Image: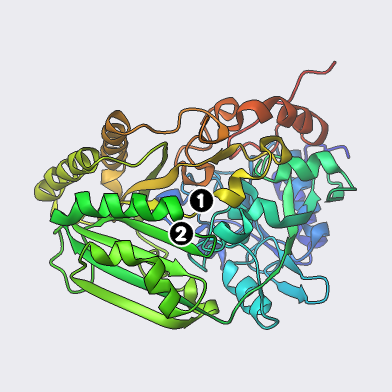
Amino acid sequence: MSFFAQQPSIALAKLKESLSGEVVCPGDEGYNNGIARWSDNCVKQAGYVVFPKNNEDVVEAIKFARGQNLELAIYGGGHSYSGSSSTEGGVVIHLGKYINYARCDPEKRLLYVGGGATWEIVEKVGMEHGLATVAGNVNHTGVGGLALGGGYGWLTGRHGMTVDNTVQYTVVLASGEVVTANEKEHPDLFWGCRGGGSNFGVVTEFVFKAHPQRPTVFITTLIYTIDKLERLLNAVEDWHETAGPDEGLHWGCMRVLPGAQPGTPTLIAMYFYNGDAADARKAAKKLYDVGPIAEKAMEDLPFIKLNTLQNESSAHGGRKYIKGLTTRSRASAEAIQAVLQAQDEIVKSNPALVHCGILFDYCPKKSVVEIPLEATAYAGRGTGAEGIIFQFYTDAALDESVQRQVRGWSQILSEKTPVAFRTGKGGESYGVGYTNFDPDAAASDAARVFGANYQRLREVKRKYDPEKVWNRWYPIEPAESS
């Protein structure tokens, strides 16, 4: 497809005429909703926001942006830590307003999901047939970013990552061509989309494997005083060594919890079991033996409510800076205490910054590591724990200082705890920090992130996006022509 520059007013008029959906500009009704993001510090003033209703609308949006030499960004759910779904002055293709469906084929055990859907509708539609796929942990997260970047969730221990459960993509390329990518059609693109993010085009539909899922699960939140840190670390490590595929655990330290004095560092462990409560409590005995001061257990929680439990603490709005890192072995008490001390100093100097902490995801990874590293573009199949250090705040004037603080806390932890430094799998080589947890993904080194898979990704990039139109998330450099 050829693109010829036109006067902006003429090009915009033609775009409006061609769309089944809408396009809005600054000052138009719907514009502010179009640029709103999960984190306010990821909001950028786009020149245009296109709300497509179908693939043809996406094609027209791409044609318009390229004709005006404007940057393109893709909005799936707007949760990106790095703001990759936003653009300053460019064109946002906002899939969330219309292309947000999900439907289930229970006989084939497949879920067909629009590129702008959130996991809430996917879980609802699937469980109407007793089926589920690997989602994240917060159901208002968009499907697209999580599914293209990797995808961990409570079901990872049993079914692997989201990329391992994706069987097909519908992709609108920068050329305007609409292609289907699966194991038989465009298999190279299919491989690249499974971990390569938004580097190849606009994914307007995903098809996921759906697995039989029991209607209720067990989950409990255990609260501990900070003096139990060493004991909890040991218990988590012991539990993790023998954890089964139907278990999962998030644990860490926070300063804002219901019923607690804001600012007091408190240990929290959220334990998941995809089974009966009696079996769950036996499997989690080591965590109970540490001696929690409080527990909130849900013994027969409907599965469709599982990923609502963290919605409030992860709500839209406010400013958030989150730095991810993957530990190669258990974090030491010394390392965590050093981070907490540094956070204490910040909170004392500015009580408005009390909403900070550190969290780790300890899902069993046998099913992740069993997949060959070269099977998908995703290259972080290590055995370590995925961690985040975070600061939530509201004052835009603090953006730069907060970024320095969180990076400093991350540095403290990495100096005292072995962290992932290269791609790979298993215990011999470890995955770098989980790609969806990187606040600087737009400027990060793709070669480091994708490791041994990078050269193959460069070949895919040369074939499907040789002009680097898609460059908002770990931008891949196209391979040179042979």
Q: Position of residue 177 (x, y in %)?
A: 86, 46
Residue 319 placement: quadrant: bottom left
Q: Which mark is residue 133?
A: none
Q: How would you rate the neighbour count of disc 2 (Cα within 10 Å): few for under 14, some for 14-19, many for 20 or more?
A: many
Report if residue 252 is visible in the image: yes
- Callout 1 amino acid: Ser
Farthest residue toward the top?
482
Q: Is residue 453 above or below residue 56?
A: above
Between 61 and 251, the residue placed more toward the observer is 251
Secondary structure beneath label 1: loop
Q: Are marks 1 and 2 in contact (CB under 8 Å)?
A: yes
Residue 465 placement: quadrant: top right
Q: How would you rate the neighbour count of disc 1 (Cα within 10 Å): few for under 14, some for 14-19, many for 20 or more?
A: many
- Callout 2 amino acid: Trp
Going 57% across and 72% down the picture, which residue do you hit? Answer: 120
Between 317 and 130, the residue placed more toward the observer is 130
Going 57% across and 32% down the picture, which residue do you hit? Answer: 424
Q: Position of residue 333 (x, y in %)?
A: 22, 43
Location of mark 1 (residue): 80
If you read the primary sequence from the N terminus, does the residue marked by circle 1 or circle 2 appear first? 2
Between 268 and 388, the residue placed more toward the observer is 268
In the image, 265: left or right of 474? left
Q: Position of residue 271 (x, y in %)?
A: 39, 66
In the image, 221: left or right of 423? left
For the N terminus, give its image quadrant: top right
Between 302 and 147, the residue placed more toward the observer is 302
Q: Position of residue 415 (x, y in %)?
A: 29, 28
Location of mark 2 (residue): 38
Going 27% across and 31% down the picture, which residue do you hit? Answer: 416
